[in-house]
Image (cartoon, helix red, strand yellow):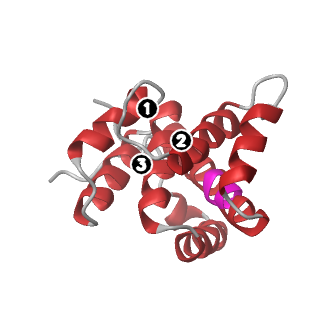
Amino acid sequence: MTLQRMDLMAVIPDAYQAVLGLEKYSRSHVDPTLYELVKLRASMINGCAYCVDMHSHDAMEAGETAQRLFGLAAWEDGPFYTDKERAALALTDEATRLGEHGVTDEVWNNATSHFTDEEVANLLVAIATINVWNRICVPTRREPAHR
């Protein structure tokens, strides 16, 4: 086990508050169930223990099932998600990994067939925001809460 390297909120509180502003915006503009699935999936991809812990607990407190949360590790093969959720998860995967070719037309077109332009834009902000948090928490080794 390693110790947390830095507390960004203590070192640069204005920057922390700026990211928190994006978080508050995202939380209020994306469906709560979908929001937690996207946050948890991106955090799994990025290996962020703090965010995986936080978003799995938040999702369960909001009524999400353990089966659907555990199933996120292999969401493409599991029968637990709607077509709309699958479109959002595929967008999350590609926007988080951002390979050489970015987000494919197939994934983009699928997302835009299930969501309005405004919903896709809000989903992208939510995906980008969790990636910012992951990229802060992983290098600083932010530790999950001891429950």
Q: Earlier in the sequence, mark 3 or mark 2?
A: 3
For badge 3, the amino acid type reads Cys
User: Residue 141 sits in which quadrant?
Assistant: top left
Q: Residue at x 53, y 34 (%)?
A: 46
Q: Tell which residue pokes out farthest to the left in this image.
A: 147
Distance (Cα) linking label 1 and label 2: 8 Å
Check disc 2 and report the residue beneath it.
86
Check disc 1 and report the residue beneath it.
75
For badge 1, the amino acid type reads Trp
Check disc 3 and report the residue beneath it.
51
Q: Earlier in the sequence, mark 1 or mark 2?
A: 1
For badge 2, the amino acid type reads Arg
The majority secondary structure of the magenta stretch comes to helix
Give the percent coordinates (x, y) of residue 83: 53, 44
Residue 52 in the figure: left or right of residue 45? left
Quadrant showing the N terminus:
top left
Closest to the observer, 129 or 87: 87
Task: Answer whether labels 1 and 2 touch (C-beta < 8 Å).
Answer: yes
Task: Answer whether labels 3 and 1 touch (C-beta < 8 Å).
Answer: no
Residue 51 in the figure: left or right of residue 29? left
Q: Which residues are magenta?
A: 123-127
Q: Residue at x 66, y 71 (%)?
A: 18
Task: Answer whether labels 3 and 2 touch (C-beta < 8 Å).
Answer: no
Residue 142 in the figure: left or right of residue 132? left
Q: Residue at x 60, y 43 (%)?
A: 87
